[in-house]
Amino acid sequence: MSFKQILLLGILAICRISCPQLLLAEVVRCEIESRAPLANGQQFGPRKLVYEKLTGKLFLEVDPNHAANRRVTDLKLADSNERGMVTFWTDFCLLKPVEVAKGNRRLFYDVNNRGNKLAMGAFNDSTGNRNLADNPGNGFLMRQGYSVLWCGWNGDVRPGNDRLQIGLPIARENGEPITGHIYAEVTVNTKTFSQPFYWGNSNPYPAVSTDHRSAKLTVRRDRQSPAVEIPHDKWQFSRFENGKAVPDLKHLHLKDGFQPGLLYELIYTGINPRITGLGFAAVRDAVAFCKHAGADGKAANPLAGTVEKAYIFGISQSGRFIHHFLYDGFNTDENGRMVFDAAIPHVGGGGKGQFNYRFAQTTRHGSQHEDLLFPSDFFPFNTVPQTDPHTGRTADTFARARAKGHLPKIFFTETSTEYWCRAGSLLHTDVDGTKDADVDSNVRIYFFAGAQHGNSSSSSRGIYQNERNTLDHRPLLRALLVALDEWATTGKKPPSSDYPRIDNGTLVVLETWKKQFPVLPDSNRPRFLYTPLRLDPGPRWETLGIADNVPPKVLEPPYRTLVPAVDRDGNEVAGIALPAVSVPLATYSGWNLRGKGCGAEGMLARWSGSQWPLTRTPQERRKTGDPRRSILERYPTRAAYVARVRDSVDRLRQGRFLLAEDADRIVRKAESRNFWKE
């Protein structure tokens, strides 16, 4: 190497350290379209912070030849600008203190869920339209001093209802459109005559033509039943409006109607795949921009010089997004810097998702009845190296992040629903469910006993057989965010992981659980739990993100999942138990069953749990045949009940699972109960 070459490399290294934005384009323009006070200038917390809401667009560029972008499927098939960069844009929404330097210098990034903003509901108890970031609720995130950011990542989100959008480029081969076989599944809860190819406010890939003779549509009762092909004269690519079929390349019209609960499977030729993996790059680069960019120029950063740490949070699909983001190594930006310092993938179960593949359907995830042929739950699952004895493969889900030294502090938070419906046990067991796995020292796993996938304020059965679960687990999230911040900031160790395990008998097979769960009045037990299938989309899937087997081949054996053990009341014995579970007035579960009216009766609900209130008196218990002790048998006086609740609250506070404000609220609610005749 010549002296000039060495000198040039040295200059480039210095520039990369001191002025990284000069070398690599990330966010090249930030357009603020609106700026308004949050909650009419309300003041939050002891620092009396006043917040503002900014919305607009970020314009981004990525280098298709850069190592940081190597994992983006089809990136080199995108059009590029005169400098060889691939360009795209995303909506953004930012809540920040007006005097941003007075905040806590922490960026809280909420991964939108199908375009929806969820963090304000999860931490601030905000109500109303979940996409309106204008409602600060109890103000928790604001009182803590966070700047809260959202941006688009999911290119198949339909516009409307303030859902976040992203403009992803289309992959082309030699300038020509790309086509490919696509597998779609349709399931409905009420009879209808047309449906989009897939659900979740999603924009499906269109068929290449309304001529559907090369496509195939079948129907089956469940995954174990044989598929029956539906003749081509019984369906077409159209939507049914005002009694007429209107040609539509993204909809199925079935002349006899879709029957509730049945599985309709379509294989068709689609066109123009979006470069979906750029959603990972959008999140990476938007946050890197907020952490590092300056306040001047077209890419003026509204948080310039004020972000010391960045945390990522996501619910359900968004939790799986975080898991996959780290799996694919996107926590390192183009300048080699760590993006997120800490992460909370919430209620994502054991899964990742279709977030970085050709013709990806990002909204899909496997469940006990539906979408079982979509690879959302795949090896590796563990946070440390594991071996699949059936394939001989050894891997771990965080190998890429760890190799770059950019594995953040991570809290996996799961409810009971994730063990029943989202393969949560595979996070911390072997693939056969026979032994516990180790957990990376940078990771904690917390199980919220008795809770369901999302919070519900209504116990209405809806389409399900049991009352819906109303256990509110959001106080646990607030306390854990404080603990995570302390860990990432000062190194203070968080509480130890708390989840059901095989070695102590708190994580069990379904048959064992059936023997433990009491026979309750007006209740049917589940016959199944979600068991992810081993799927083979073909030889190019893992390396190029392209499926050759459509639908994927099913290999044997399936992965084996387990569920949390329960006590004589049916409440789960492991994990973090809020007073509603440890001092029960009801039995809470993470599973529910589909009712007769919505079809597929007895199959597991995808996201809903159940609850069975205790009887008030021994006489009521005996009359109904309820095996559980009544409320008055457990707590003869209000004082006895409140004392038990206080003890439970104190234990949670000492364990750093509950904040003082939530502890006080829980005790006040207990004091207001009126089961006793004074």
Image (cartoon, helix red, strand yellow):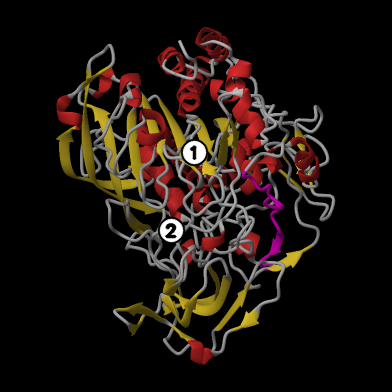
Answer whether residue 280 is magenta in the image: no
Report the magenta residues as a range: 522-539
- Is residue 445 in view? no
The answer to if 531 sits in the magenta stretch is yes
Amino acid at the residue labelled 2: Gly
Numbered badge on residue 649: none
**Residue, disc 2:** 200
Q: Is residue 113 left or right of residue 57?
A: right
Q: Which residue is mark 1?
A: 336
In the rendered image, which quarter contains the C terminus?
Answer: top left
User: Residue 549 at what x, y percent from top left?
Assistant: 66, 72
Q: Is residue 417 visible?
A: yes
Q: Quadrant of residue 648?
A: top right
Coordinates of residue 115 in the picture (x, y in percent): 37, 51
Left or right of 116 in this view: 478? right
Q: Main SS of the magenta segment? A: loop
Q: Position of residue 114 (x, y in %)?
A: 41, 52
Viewer-proximal residue among 337 and 3: 337
Q: Position of residue 349 (x, y in %)?
A: 60, 43
Three-letter code, disc 1:
Gly
Q: Quadrant of residue 110?
A: top left
Q: Residue at x 42, y 12 (%)?
A: 664
- Residue in front for this viewpoint, 599 or 6: 599
Q: Earlier in the sequence, mark 2 or mark 1?
A: 2
Badge 1: few (under 14), some or many (20 or more) residues near its Cα, within 10 Å?
A: some
- Between circles 2 and 1, the one closer to the viewer is 2
Q: Residue at x 39, y 65 (%)?
A: 203
Q: Residues within 10 Å of mark 2 (few under 14, many from 20)?
A: some
The residue at the point 43 percent across, 58 percent down is 200
Q: Is residue 212 above or below residue 580?
A: below
User: Quadrant location of residue 580?
Assistant: top right
Say which quadrant the N terminus sits in.
top right
